[in-house]
Image: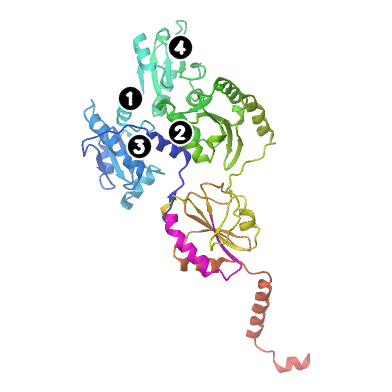
Amino acid sequence: MATCSRIPFAFLVALLLLLSSSTARAEEEAVLTLDAGNFSEVVAAHQFIVVEFYAPWCGHCKQLAPEYETAASILSKHDPPVVLAKVDASDKTNKDLSSKYDVQGFPTIMILRNQGDNAQEYNGPRDADGIVEYLKKQVGPASVEIKSVEDATNLIGDKGVVIVGVFPAFGGREFEDFMAVAEKMRNDYDFLHTLDASILPRGDRAVKGPAVRLFKPFDELFVDSQDFDKDALQKFIEVSGFPTVVTYDTHPTNHKYLLKYFENDGTKAMLFLSFDDDRIEAFKSQFYEAAKQYGEKNISFLIGDVTDAQGALQYFGLKESEVPLLFIQVSTTKYIKPTVEPDQILPWLKEYTDGTLLPHVKSDPIPVVNDQPVKVVVADSIDDVVFNSGKNVLLEFYAPWCGHCQKLAPTLDEVAVLLQNDEDVIIAKMDATTNDIPPDFAVDGYPTMYFYSSAGNLLPYEGGRTAEEIIDFIKKNKGSKPGEAAVDDVAAENDVMEEQEPEPESVKDEL
């Protein structure tokens, strides 16, 4: 059934980043076209190949296409050449390929190493120059040796997280474990190794290793570890390499932190304000202190400039007029503190952790007049109209911009008119972009329809989109009118009695 996607916010962030990239031109045919027929053969012929899974109708894929083509043309001249390819994942013949690489959205880009034995999802930039720079690093060794101060200055810089292993010699268990982790995590981080700790920024001649120093452009700027257990080292990098407070802005170095932040299923605390606010330092100080105090309670923190975070405000239904605004999201539950002051941040978060805050429910006003065939439901009226009305309710969740919803609208009007004489049936709709959706409903795209019967059964509607099919579904699944079930039961019992054979005369006489 065709629907308009209700894009998870991580994908929304990816879209915003993609749209912010520059437009480039490329030579045609630089990207190899693969399908189920030639995929295995081509991948088996390459130690390193990059494959984009796309759909021709996907807007994000169309935005990426010229950048990807340009990168492919440039990388074809690299030594060694780097091959970029693509697979039409919407083609049914390529369905098994999409399943093999767990393609959940478009575009999905995979880096395949060792004839395809090692597959990792591409997490780099989406502009041509960024793709080229990123893949040049990926095609080389997982960790690069640095031998001089100049090497260290050029390769570490201050733009991202860099992990440096310091060793007395390039061998032994610690070095091997470090290289294994570097190979596993190279998609997300840059790894370096050296014999001389003194050449590092803020270096220390006394350090002979084995040790790991993680450099980062935030928080304490660097942190050390001497635990080379592979699981412990990976955990150290993941935790230490993530900001205490993520910044929502358009700077490329923050892209991957934003994606990881919104992919996290835990509680999220977000502060949106103008970075030109005279109180910005006070806000940052209080918010960072809150992150230190409550970060261990599985709460992750983000601060966003209202100008750069317009997409986030729109997605979460927040009002720019209410910034500075403190916002907590726990699954589908939201808590909002509008026009917050710096000294209110810590007390408000304590109220949340103490369980004394009331959730915020986003809702349109309840309509004063609601006399159209298809009734309007809002978050503040859904209990009365759907769950507590005792009626059989077909409810559509829609988005005003959704073409499929616009096409369905006259059909639902027709259904409502045809059933208007049935007082026990309600056809209703709710704007899912301006109202919070209760957790009872799973809405992953638009339109999504559910049927709640008077008997209390909640069913997703996944049938056809003609009036006849919808009406047939309602009639088959609707509950009985009050008293109707008892009458039906008596009638059914009478039918059974009538079907039974009459008792023999002799028996009656004896009785």
Q: Residue at the top extreme? A: 205
**C-alpha distance separating marks 1 and 2:** 21 Å
Name the quadrant containing residue 291: top right
Instruction: Return the disc, 3 or 2, that comes first in the chain's sequence.
Output: 3
User: Quick check: 497 left or right of 439?
Assistant: right
Residue position marked by numbered label 1 in the rendering: 137
Q: Nearer the viewer, mark 1 or mark 2?
A: 2
**C-alpha distance separating marks 1 and 4:** 25 Å
Name the kind of residue labelled 3 in the image: Met
Give me the residue at 37% from left, 31% from top.
124
User: In front here: 166 or 330?
Assistant: 330
**C-alpha distance separating marks 1 and 3:** 15 Å
Q: Is residue 331 above or below residue 125?
A: below
**C-alpha distance separating marks 2 and 4:** 34 Å
Name the quadrant containing residue 44: top left
User: In front here: 259 or 341?
Assistant: 341
Residue position marked by numbered label 3 in the rendering: 110
State yes or no: residue 145 in magenta: no
* Residue 452, x across and y down, in percent: 58, 60
Magenta segment boundaries in residue numbering: 404-429
Residue 511 visible in the displayed image? yes
Name the kind of residue labelled 1 in the image: Lys
Q: Are marks 1 and 3 in contact (CB under 8 Å)?
A: no
Color theme of the render: rainbow
**C-alpha distance separating marks 3 and 2:** 17 Å
Tag on residue 259? 2
Instruction: Return the disc, 4 or 3, that comes first in the chain's sequence.
Output: 3
Instruction: Return the disc, 1 or 4, that comes first in the chain's sequence.
Output: 1
